Image: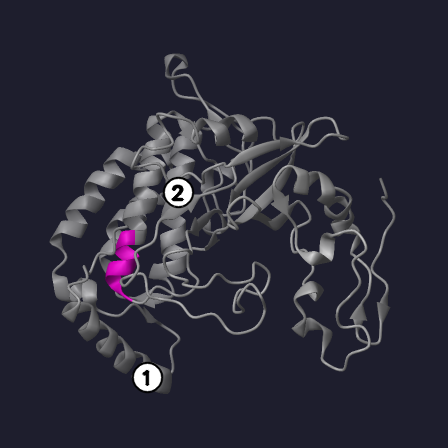
Amino acid sequence: MSTHTHGSTDSYGPVELLASEIFWRDHQEWLSQKGYMLRPRYRPGWTPSWKGKDKYYRRYEDAQTILVPHILDAVRKSDGELVVLKCVQQSVHPFERQISLFFSTEPYSSHPHNHCVPIYDVLDVPDEDGKFILVMPLLRAYSDPRLKSVGEAVEFFRQIFEGLQFMHQCHVAHRDCMDLNILQDPRPTFPKMYHPRVTRMTYDFRRLVTYHTRTARPTKYFFIDFGLSRRYNPKDGPPLEPPIRGGDKTVPEFKDSVAPVNPFPTDIYYLGNLIREDFLQVKTGVEFMEPLVNDMVQDDPSKRPTIDEVVQRFNSIQNSLPWWKLRSRLVDKKEDGFNRFIRNFRHRYRTFLHILAFRSALPTP
């Protein structure tokens, strides 16, 4: 199979694939036989649709290049569902396949507290030993579009605590549960699915997408990326692992130390720091989370609450919140006066419609 580098351009943009896209082009026919169709860009004989035309090339669907070399979107041929293909090297992430499939197998897969991304299929790459592809649903960043109300934020907190509690009860430490590894199911909120590379456009690239709020169409959040995750035997006692740095580089126990640590309190830190950085530091409306988050991000891992204690304390917090607080707007601290006025007006109007429709202030799917 071809391995040479492409990427030459003409006056209107690149007319050949990037080097990181060659693997997918070379395996397109095999993937099609397995039931997954890649976008036209990756099919044999592809010719850029913008050649000889006057429009800027980025306005064409087949000009959208790959973002992460080992991850690409596809369409499942049996039903037209958009999926994500993740290519994994077994020698680099020896436990990812095992743990991913563990949570996608009964009795765990149907458990209501399971928030691990479901695995639809596992494909062993035929010409490369130790390389396989995980097939998953297409998900979207948890924060895009922005959460509109305090109730939507509270429901997000509830689900990620519930999901991590389920993982820990199954003796699995995620070890990298930072913001980029928590996604949402976009299907309830997007009536017409978006393009995976240009998420403001519909899949056919003909118009801008529209979407519903989470209060109108509740969604579910998922943990992804189990490349650093481990499952432990409780009979062996609390596990100790050498530091392994994921996407969040602020973990206190990893600073200036190589001493083995228990990965379960580190998971607690990751979620606490996510709420601290993505909500408490940049938004107003969820200050009631500060005492819990402060305990979750303590420098000493032994002083952090367990996930069971986190869930218990959070449930008490949630039950204490009045309906008007849950209905209130989640406000960006850096909002200027004009945007605040416009968003307040829109929020009041939406809230009025939600109340008329008897929609819950806590949008549980």
Query: For mark 2, what is the residue?
Result: 269
Q: Nearer the viewer, residue 97 or 333?
A: 97
Residue positioned most to the top = 235
Q: Is residue 79 left or right of residue 8?
A: left
348 up-or-down from 87: above or below:
below
Q: Which of the 4 image quadrants contains residue 263?
A: top left
The label on residue 342 is 1
Query: Of callouts 1 and 2, which one flags the residue occurring earlier in the amino acid sequence?
Result: 2
**Amino acid type, mark 1:** Ile
Q: Position of residue 186 (x, y in %)?
A: 42, 56
89 up-or-down from 271: above or below:
above
Q: Position of residue 288 (x, y in %)?
A: 22, 57
**Amino acid type, mark 2:** Tyr
Q: Residues in magenta?
A: 149-155
Residue positioned most to the front = 78
Tell me the crowding category of disc 1: few under 14, some 14 to 19, or many 20 or more residues within 10 angstroms, Cα based. few
Measure the alpha-carbon separation of dots 1 and 2.
Answer: 36 Å
Task: Name the element at disc 2.
Answer: helix
Task: Name the element at disc 1.
Answer: helix
Residue positioned most to the bottom = 338
Q: Position of residue 262 (x, y in %)?
A: 43, 28
The coloring applied to the image is one colour
* Magenta-span inclusion, residue 262: no
Tell me the crowding category of disc 2: few under 14, some 14 to 19, or many 20 or more residues within 10 angstroms, Cα based. many
The label on residue 186 is none
Is residue 242 at all visible to an observer of this figure? no
Q: Quadrant of the N terminus?
A: top right
For the point 45% across and 26% down, the residue is 102
Q: Mark 1 or 2, which is nearer the eye?
A: 1
Is residue 166 at all visible to an observer of this figure? yes
Q: Is residue 144 left or right of residue 56?
A: left
Q: Main secondary structure of the magenta part?
A: helix
